[in-house]
């Protein structure tokens, strides 16, 4: 398959297990993964760039954090480890991804949920995402316009986008929507964007 099945709520591809090993926060993480979820055989280079370049929360961070498009949960796991006093929402449409995230974050401060399972009243101190660019611009824009407005007044979103997949044009689009969007880092063909809500 071409790999786009990870956008499906219930992937039909065979369930083949795999372990993904990576480093963050000065330690090693070993997470269960499986076919049918995004970048199931390794830590995606964009996600690796985001975790390396954006400032991770610390032990004093509280409130709700969002991992948007969590996959098997690498970002959510790192956020929960860095900020045990926060509540990390790991959101994905892929049920297999959510099951893996629950397995990988068992006993941690993580709520893995489908988008409609997150109460509309929840606002986020931080949003982290390696957004699904390949779903197409209309769907991507709708996704971001659903979640970015839920940033708390002083909240910040960290997004990673490959330059050749439109990282710079996405930054311009975010600015056109009224968000404060700046390029925080650029590495190995990826843009890490820092996004804040409009002041008004």
Image (spheres, rainbow, N blue to C red):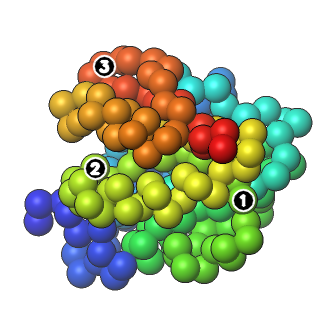
Helix, strand or loop status at disc 3: loop
The residue indicated by pointer 1 is 123
Numbered badge on residue 188: 3
Whichever of labels 2 and 1 marks the residue nearer the N terminus, that label is 1
Query: Picture coordinates of residue 117 (x, y %)?
Result: 60, 80
Q: Is 22 on the left-hand or right-hand side of 2?
A: right
Query: Picture coordinates of residue 32 (x, y %)?
Result: 48, 58
- Of 121 and 68, nearer the camera is 121
Q: Residues within 10 Å of mark 2 (few under 14, many from 20)?
A: some
Q: Is residue 97 above or below residue 131?
A: below
Which residue is drawn at the image coordinates 34% and 33% (left, top)?
A: 172
Query: Are the two marked residues, 2 and 1, in contact with CB atoms closer than 8 angstroms?
Result: no
The residue indicated by pointer 2 is 133
* Number of marks in picture: 3
What is the quadrant of residue 108 in the picture?
bottom right
- Of 70 and 19, nearer the camera is 70
How far is mark 2 from mark 3, CA to CA? 17 Å
């Amino acid at each position: 398959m071409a790999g786009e099945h990870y956008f499906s709520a219930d992937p039909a591809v065979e369930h083949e297990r795999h372990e993904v090993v990576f480093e963050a926060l000065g330690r090693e993480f070993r997470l269960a993964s499986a076919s049918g979820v995004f970048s199931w055989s390794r830590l995606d280079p964009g996600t690796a760039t985001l975790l390396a370049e954006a400032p991770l929360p610390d032990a004093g961070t509280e409130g709700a954090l969002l991992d948007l498009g969590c996959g098997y949960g690498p970002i959510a796991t790192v956020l929960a480890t860095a900020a045990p006093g926060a509540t990390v929402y790991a959101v994905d449409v892929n049920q297999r991804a959510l099951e893996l995230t629950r397995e990988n974050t068992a006993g941690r401060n993580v709520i893995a949920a489908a988008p409609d399972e997150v109460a509309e009243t929840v606002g986020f101190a931080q949003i982290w995402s390696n957004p699904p660019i390949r779903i197409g611009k209309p769907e991507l824009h709708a996704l971001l316009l659903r979640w970015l407005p839920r940033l708390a007044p002083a909240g910040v979103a960290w997004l990673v986008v490959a330059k050749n997949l439109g990282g710079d044009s996405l930054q311009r689009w975010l600015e056109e929507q009224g968000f404060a969007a700046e390029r925080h880092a650029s590495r190995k063909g990826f843009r890490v964007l820092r996004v804040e809500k409009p002041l008004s």
